[in-house]
Image: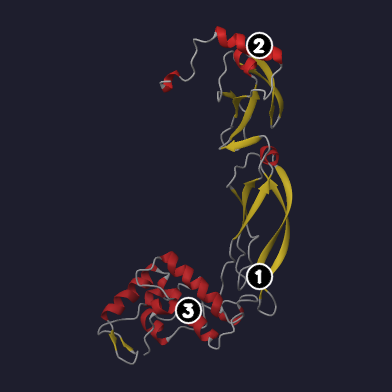
Amino acid sequence: MEYKDYYKILGVKESASAEEIKKSYRKLARKYHPDVSKEADAEASFKELGEAYEVLKDPEKRAEYDQLRKMGAFSGDGHFQPPPGWESASHFSGGGFTDADPQHFSDFFEAIFGRSGTAHRQYGRGGRQYGFQMRGDDIHHKLPLFLEEVYSGVSKQITVNIPEVDERGMLAHKRKTLNVKIPAGMAPGQHIRLRGQGAPGVGGADSGDLFLEIELAPHPVFSVQGNDILINLPITPWEAALGTQVVVPTLSGKVNVKIPKGATQGQKLRLKGRGLKGGKQGDQIVILQISVPSQHSKEAEELYAKLAEQEKSYNPRNKMGV
């Protein structure tokens, strides 16, 4: 009988992982599927792929096949003769096939694993008489949001392009409009999964999922660090020196914040519970930025000169050795 090199058919190495085998099969099955392929031998190649995948995806079948490859007798013309005492692995019969279920397998397959005995399943358009099912691909889509929308949660109407095979068997894209509810507290990079909203399956199989990745639009005032909201707050030198109370914006409204006496550049003040709400409640971090006027009145300059004289013992560069 004709020998079948299932690894060569699927274009993988003998050491290939289960994921590598699955990935190669899906790629080639789409290429040779008789509904869409323009290849002359598409149907035969498609059935051969299904048979190879049926063996290599199953750890037990693969082990049997690998053992037979080591023991079998191969002639130079590509034929195979089972070794003496080899018996067809009939314990695989009747188990059915999940991903590839052609009308029949080759003599080589049946000599090793026996006949399925499973009734042929009927699928819708796309599977036709080939008994093939493949779940649709997952689609990934970036969803930009304003920080205020992430903080409070929002309902959005989005439009995405979903790839599908049209009636002529050509790859096309269908625009799909969806209403999506974004829960409060979603962090940048997190995903929302919409089951069954991805690419349609083949042969009546399930559609893939749509994954929406949250992106934040730049904000003119706030930045995000984990679940914390950060804000740089300008204060004057005299506010820093004397201490005061100032109004600070937050995503939930303005609040009064006490600036401590002797505040320093870069000092951080924490507003509990004013950050993002997802998972662990975040805070708002107020980072003090001492802002000096670019121009001073004559009176202000005189006061600075007087201050310099009174505080001349203070050297902020002392630790630098200067």
Look at the numbered discs 2 and 1 and tell me whether their residues touch, using CB distance below 8 Å. Answer: no
3D distance between C-alphas at marks 1 and 3 = 22 Å
Tell me which label, 1 or 3, sits earlier in the chain.
Answer: 3
Is residue 193 placed above or below 126 in the rendered structure? above
Label 1 crowd (10 A; few <14 / some 14-19 / many >=20)? some
Place of residue 14 in the rendered image (x, y in percent of width and height, measured from the top left): 35, 72
SS at mark 3 in the image: helix
Tell me which label, 2 or 1, sits earlier in the chain.
Answer: 1
Please give left or right for residue 103 compared with residue 112 in the image: right
Q: Amino acid at mark 3?
A: Leu
Q: Name the residue furthest top.
A: 310
Place of residue 290 in the rendered image (x, y in percent of width and height, measured from the top left): 61, 23
The residue singled out by tag 3 in the image is 49
Q: Amino acid at mark 1?
A: Glu
SS at mark 1 in the image: strand
Label 3 crowd (10 A; few <14 / some 14-19 / many >=20)? many
Q: What count of labels does the image hold?
A: 3
Is residue 101 placed above or below 40 in the rendered structure? above
Q: Nearer the viewer, mark 2 or mark 1?
A: 2
Please give left or right for residue 210 compared with residue 101 in the image: right
The residue singled out by tag 2 in the image is 302
- Identify the residue shown where x is 35% and y is 77%: 89
Q: Nearer the viewer, mark 1 or mark 3?
A: 1
3D distance between C-alphas at marks 2 and 1 = 76 Å
Q: Nearer the viewer, mark 2 or mark 3?
A: 2
